[in-house]
Amino acid sequence: MQSLILLGLIMAVGFAVFARGAHLRIYWLPVATMVVFLLAGFLISLNHRLLSVRFNLKTDIPLILFLAWAALSTLSSINREETIFEVMRLSTMVMVYFLVAYALSPKPDKKVLAFAIVGIGFLEATYGLSEFIMHRPLFQITWVNLPRSILRVSGTLVNYNHFAGLMEMCIFLGFGLIMAVGTKERVQSELLAKRALLAIPCGIMILALILSLSRGGWASFIAGALFFMSIFLWKEHPLWSRVLAIAFMVMILVGAFIMGVNREPLIKRFESLETLYREPEQISNDTRISIWKSTAGMIQDHPWTGTGWGTLRSAYPSYRRDYFFHGVEFAHNDYLQIAAGTGLPGLFFFLLFLFMLFREGFHVIRTQDQEFLAKAMPGVMAGLFAILFHELVDFNLMIPSNAMIFFALAGIVAARARSQQ
C-alpha cells in the first residue's frame, strides 16, 4: 500500500510540474483533493496499527491550526465560493505533508521520493535549457494560450520566477542526497563516482536557475547556499566544498557552451541590475511595492480572519494604489497574502509551523544520525529556506507544483524528527 501512495505522490508532483499545474488547477485540484483524502482514509483503515506511532505534534498542530483558520475565514469571506475552492486546494497541499510524513515507510519510500523530486527538477531544467538553446518551444499546447519566452529558461512552468523556485528546492535537495550517498565501508572511488554522478543534475539545475534570469531566484539561491554551508561549518564537515566544486564545475562547462549559443539575454539582465542601483527612485515605483501597500490595507481592515483565503483577486480592486496594473491575483509576497486572506492569526500559525519545522530539522542534524535522510537533512532544510526566502518577493507557495514539493520536503523533515523522539 505504501508503494501505491508513493507512486501516486510522484505522479501528482510530476503532473503538477510538467502540466503547468498553476493554470490547470480549476480542473484537476478538486478531484485531486477528493482522491488524496480517499487514499489517506483507505490507508488509515488498512494500516491503523502502523499509523498508531507518535505523531510529531510540534509541527502537526500549527499546520492543522493554519488549515483550520483558513477554513474559518470562509465565514467572513468576501467571496465564499472562491474561498471554499482555495481551501480545498490548500487541503490537498497539506495532505501531501501528512502522506509523506506518516503514510510512507520510514526509509526506502521517502528515499525514493527524494530522488524522484530531484529527477523531476532535472528533467524540467533540461527541458528549459533545450528550449533556450534551440530558440523555440519544444512543445506547444494549443489549448493553453500562454506566452512563451526563449530569451530565458522557464521550462514548462512558463513563469521564470516559479521555475527558479522549483530549481532552488531541487538543487539543495540534490546536495543533501549527494552528502548522504555511501557509507565509510564503501570503496572511496565508488563513493566519489556516485557523488559525481549526482552532482551533474545539480550543476545543470544551477545553470538553468541562472539562465532563468530571476533576480529573486538568484538572491534566494545565494541565501540557501549560505544556509547550507553554515550547517556544514556548524557540523565541522568539510565535504560540502567538494560537492559545491563538482556542481559548479559542471555548471561552468555546460554554461560555456550555452553562452556561446545565446548570451545576449543574460547580459541584458545584468545591465538591468546596474540600472536599478544607478537609479534608486525606480524602486519606489515598482509594481510589487504598490501591491504590497494595497495588501497591507486589506490586513489593516481585516486583521482577524482576513478577506477570506484566496480572495485577494476579489479584494484588490477596492484597495489598489496604482492605475496601471489590473487583474492582480497574488500579493507577490506569500506572507502578506496569508495575512490578507486569513488574518494575522493565520500568518502566526503558518510561521509557528515553519519555526517548529526548522527546530525539528536542526535537532536531527545535531544528533549526528547516520541514517540516509538524516544525513541529507541539511539539503532538505536549505531547499526549504531558499524557497521561503524567495517568498518575500513572489508567490511560489500559491502554485500547486511548487507547493506540493515544499510540503513533501516538510513531511520528510517532520517524519525524520518524529522517528528520533
Image (cartoon, grey):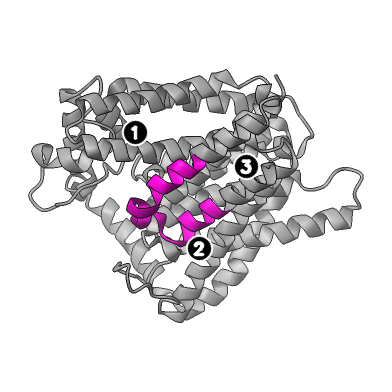
- Name the residue located 63 percent from the left edge and 53 percent from the top edge: 116
Q: Secondary structure at mark 1?
A: helix
Q: Nearer the viewer, residue 13 or 159?
A: 13
First-in-chain label (1 vs 2): 2
Residue 149 is situated, as x and y percent measured from the top left of the image, at 35, 70
Looking at the image, can residue 239 be seen?
Answer: no
* Circle 2/circle 3 CB separation < 8 Å: no
Q: Are marks 1 and 2 in contact (CB under 8 Å)?
A: no
- Secondary structure mainly formed by the magenta segment: helix
Give the crowd class for mark 3: few <14, some 14-19, many >=20 residues within 10 Å.
many
- Label 1, label 3: how many angstroms apart (C-alpha)? 23 Å
**Which quarter of the image is occupied by the C terminus?**
top right
Q: Is residue 35 magenta?
A: yes
Image height check: is 255 above or below 14? below
Local SS, label 3:
helix
> Taking 5 as reference, is 63 above or below it?
above
Residue bearing the label numbered 3: 379
Q: Is residue 237 left or right of residue 290?
A: right
Lower sequence index among marks 1 and 3 = 1
Q: Nearer the viewer, residue 342 or 279?
A: 342
Q: Nearer the viewer, residue 272 or 200?
A: 200
The residue located at (48%, 61%) in the rendering is: 18
Numbered circle sitting on residue 208: 2
Residue position for label 1:
335
Kind of residue at badge 2: Ala
Tag count: 3
Using a 10 Å C-alpha cutoff, classify the residue at mark 1 as few (fewer than 14 neighbours), some (14 to 19) or many (20 or more).
Answer: many
**Picture coordinates of residue 42 (x, y %)?**
59, 36
Q: On the picture, is 407 further left or further right than 108? A: left
Q: What is the span of residues highlighted in magenta in the rendered image?
A: 11-36
